Amino acid sequence: MKPVLGFLLGAVLGANVVTLAIFFFPFAHEKRTAELFARDEKPSESVYARVLGDAVAATHGGAFPFKPFPEGIAPLAEPNVAAGFGLIIKIRDAEDRVIGFATELEVASPESSLLRGRVMTDTYWTITLPGRGALFLHETEDNWNLVKEIYLPMLVSRSDWSGEWRNVNTVGPRPDWHGVIVAGTGEFAGKTGRFLEVGTLRSATRAGELGGLLELRLFFDEGAVEARRGGG
Amino acid sequence: MTFGRTLRLGFLVGAMVTFVVLARTPRISIPRVEPVTATGEGGVIVETFVVDMPADAVALTHSGALPLEVVPASAPKLTDPELDRGLALLAKVRNERGEVVGFLSELALTAKTDGDRVGVGDWTLVFPGRGTLFLHQEAPGRALVVGGTGSLAEAKGALVAITDGTKAKDGALVGKVELRLVREPAA
């Protein structure tokens, strides 16, 4: 009996040691929020969305800890889209005025692995600002910080979360942890550059509801802007 | 076997199993679907997609100015003044064989001169495991590729509505939209 107990106790200890080692391991990408904020780089422009107050509809195929809405929305249930997520949301300026709307389409990334502190998505933003034009953005996001600092504590404490938590959700695909401005139309035609998705979370529930503010910080390449100006 | 030895063995097994489980969590599986393409005149690559309405419409909303029911019925309308010409759509996309191979969003603005017609629009088509296409529509029926990612990063071409077999029935769009992506072969 004692050897069996020893094995079970050892197994539990081994599992816990590995789990704690991963939890406390200082992954380099965990520090991006602090490092990017420390740079205090001013974006060319920021647009905002209230989460979830500005959201019109959202759905997914089961890979996201997020409650689909509104009531009756179809899931992305088919095998080829089951890793997907789609959101329609209004967009605001810095004065909190609605200036447009956007969609955020995501695909959960097979590169995700808790062992490497990776809970990743490939994310595609389409932002339409009536009278101005549209922007098409691509980023990879890593939600490890969200899992580690919000979701796991919620799971352990069995209670919902509230507070103020800021995080740079973007982790790539650029090596400087920025996403890419792929294309633009209207006044954004010809502009290229990079961007950051910055989330300020103020509430989260175990049912999958979130509250806070999303900021998309746009950094246009000066060269591209100048070239466009020069070209008329 | 002594207690100490089984404890150490258990520790190793527990650590290794947890290591493997954490390495494989979350488990994301994206099936690889080969695109169904044909070669058109001048060597262009032609790929046909279908959106079967209303089954493939996940969400559809607008300002209320269009004679269309929102999807789902509980979806809020775009009532803000800046969005009074807006229409937003999330839908699944099928290939020629009828398999769901991706999903799309369309953000459109009704033309100022025609209150009932959708004029310009911005489309994003996501094909998990393959890539994404960003398109801009300047006129009804044709959208130009303005960018892409993944294996579609260098795509140049247009998405053309070959048939819009949809009809408004009791305020809902019913029927199939056939979209043909015509792109230049990779250099």
Image (tube, rainbow, N blue to C red):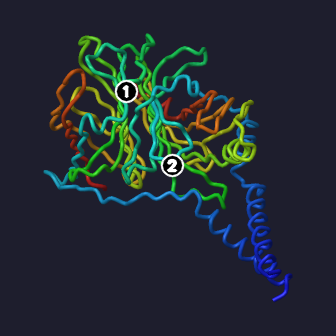
Q: Judging from the image, what secondary structure is the residue with disc 1 in?
A: strand
Residue A44 appears anywhere in the view: yes
Question: What is the x, y in percent for residue A90?
Answer: 49, 23
Which three-letter amino acid code belongs to the residue tagged 2? Ala
Classify the position of the C terminus of chain B by image quarter: bottom left
Q: Residue at x 56, y 19 (%)?
A: A93
Quadrant location, the N terminus of chain B: bottom right
Specify few, some or many for label 2: CA neighbours under 10 Å numbering under 14, 14-19, or 20 or more. some
Disc 2 and disc 1 in contact, CB within 8 angstroms? no
Chain name for mark 2? A
Name which residue lies at 65% across and 39% down. A168
Identify the residue position indicated by label 2 in the image.
Answer: A63
Cα distance between the residues tagged 2 and 1:
23 Å
Q: How would you rate the neighbour count of disc 1 (Cα within 10 Å): few for under 14, some for 14-19, many for 20 or more?
A: many
> Of the numbered discs in the image, which one, if any, rests on residue B88?
1
Q: Is residue A229 left or right of residue B136?
A: right
Residue B6 percent coordinates (x, y): 79, 82
Tag in front: 2 or 1:
2
Considering every residue shown, the one lying at the far bottom of the view is: B1
**Between residues B14 and B42, which one lies in front from this camera angle?**
B14
